[in-house]
Image (cartoon, rainbow, N blue to C red):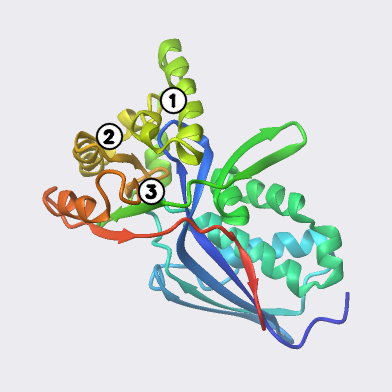
């Protein structure tokens, strides 16, 4: 492919919260907090600009995750461009269980597909984008929610990653509580045991099914539906302040969970039904450390290519 576009493309991708309690590595929710990547083909070389979250720490060369995702996408489509320039504006906190790596991967794959024009769309239809992004990320829960928006259920088959999208309750009002310091995903995963009791697995399966019903039609079941038996208790020692805030919020009747691998906490409030964002903020303020409380919305669009 020789006819690279002269102008840039711009991709906007949402933050995501995976697991939602019992939906370990399968449930995801897109949130109204976004990263924006502007990319173009240049005659030669690599140019990477980053502002916002992680600007001081992120790679600026070929190891930058957006560039790595673009390279993988171009490899699937055809030839690499002569040069690449990207400008990233990051609002999704890095290392806080909010899908920042999935957002970078999805943005890079979609930017490359857009720059490749018709060849890109033909080589990487939406299901192939999900599969490539999952391969780069390692699991599909965050990338599915980032791509599709709303509430997603993802799973893997012998043929690759699959996902379906559901529309959650329109009055669902997610509230994020973000601590000052991140926790590495690898640290959180290493805290998990190789085996769990059969009774815990059975209880978790029931809660995950209940959570789907709660999120789409029965908000009165959210507190019960977000109870987890597989991962949160095992990770508590690695993030005690997170575990303590989850417990405080749940004791007040608020459906709170660890967001992804943590350490952020996601509280699922519902309109005027029960405690709302103000009560979440009040409880977080009294939790013994500084929490940044962000009342958000569910992002219904997922990743989008913005107009030129």
Q: Nearer the viewer, mark 1 or mark 3?
A: 1
> From what the image shows, is residue 98 above or below residue 5?
above
Residue position for label 3: 184
Q: Nearer the viewer, mark 3 or mark 2?
A: 2
| Distance between the alpha carbons at the discs numbered 3 and 2 | 14 Å
Of 238 and 100, the residue lying toward us: 100
Mark with earlier residue (1, 3): 3
Q: Which residue is depicted at the point 32% across and 34% down?
A: 235
Mark with earlier residue (3, 2): 3
Mark with earlier residue (1, 2): 1
Label 1's element?
A: helix
> From what the image shows, is residue 153 above or below residue 112?
above
List x then y, in percent, for residue 111.
68, 70
| Distance between the alpha carbons at the discs numbered 1 and 3 | 27 Å
Q: Residues within 10 Å of mark 1 (few under 14, many from 20)?
A: many
Residue position for label 2: 236
Which quadrant is home to the C terminus?
Answer: bottom right
């Amino acid at each position: 492919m020789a006819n690279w576009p002269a102008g840039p493309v711009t991709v906007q991708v949402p933050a995501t919260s995976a697991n939602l309690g019992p939906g370990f590595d399968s449930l995801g929710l897109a949130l109204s907090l976004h990263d924006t990547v502007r990319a173009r083909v240049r005659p030669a070389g690599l140019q990477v600009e980053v502002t916002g979250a992680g600007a001081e720490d992120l790679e600026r060369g070929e190891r930058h995750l957006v560039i790595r995702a673009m390279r993988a996408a171009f490899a699937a489509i055809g030839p690499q461009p002569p040069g690449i320039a990207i400008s990233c504006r990051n609002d999704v906190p890095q290392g806080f269980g909010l899908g920042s790596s999935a957002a970078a991967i999805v943005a890079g794959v979609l930017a490359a597909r857009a720059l490749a024009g018709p060849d890109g769309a033909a080589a990487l239809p939406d299901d192939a984008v999900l599969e490539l992004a999952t391969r780069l990320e390692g699991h599909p829960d965050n990338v599915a929610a980032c791509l599709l928006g709303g509430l997603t259920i993802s799973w893997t088959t012998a043929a690759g990653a699959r996902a379906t999208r559901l529309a959650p309750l329109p009055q669902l009002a997610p509230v994020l509580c973000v601590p000052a310091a991140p926790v590495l995903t690898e640290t959180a995963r290493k805290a998990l045991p190789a085996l769990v009791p059969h009774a815990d697995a059975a209880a978790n399966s029931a809660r995950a099914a209940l959570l789907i019903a709660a999120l789409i039609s029965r908000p009165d079941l959210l507190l019960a539906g977000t109870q987890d038996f597989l991962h949160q208790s095992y990770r508590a020692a690695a993030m005690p302040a997170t575990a303590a805030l989850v417990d405080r919020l749940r004791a007040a009747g608020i459906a709170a969970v660890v967001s992804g691998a943590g350490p952020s906490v996601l509280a699922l409030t519902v309109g005027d039904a029960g405690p709302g964002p103000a009560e979440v903020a009040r409880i977080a303020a009294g939790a013994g450390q500084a929490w940044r409380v962000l009342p958000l919305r569910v992002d219904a669009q997922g990743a989008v290519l913005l107009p030129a």
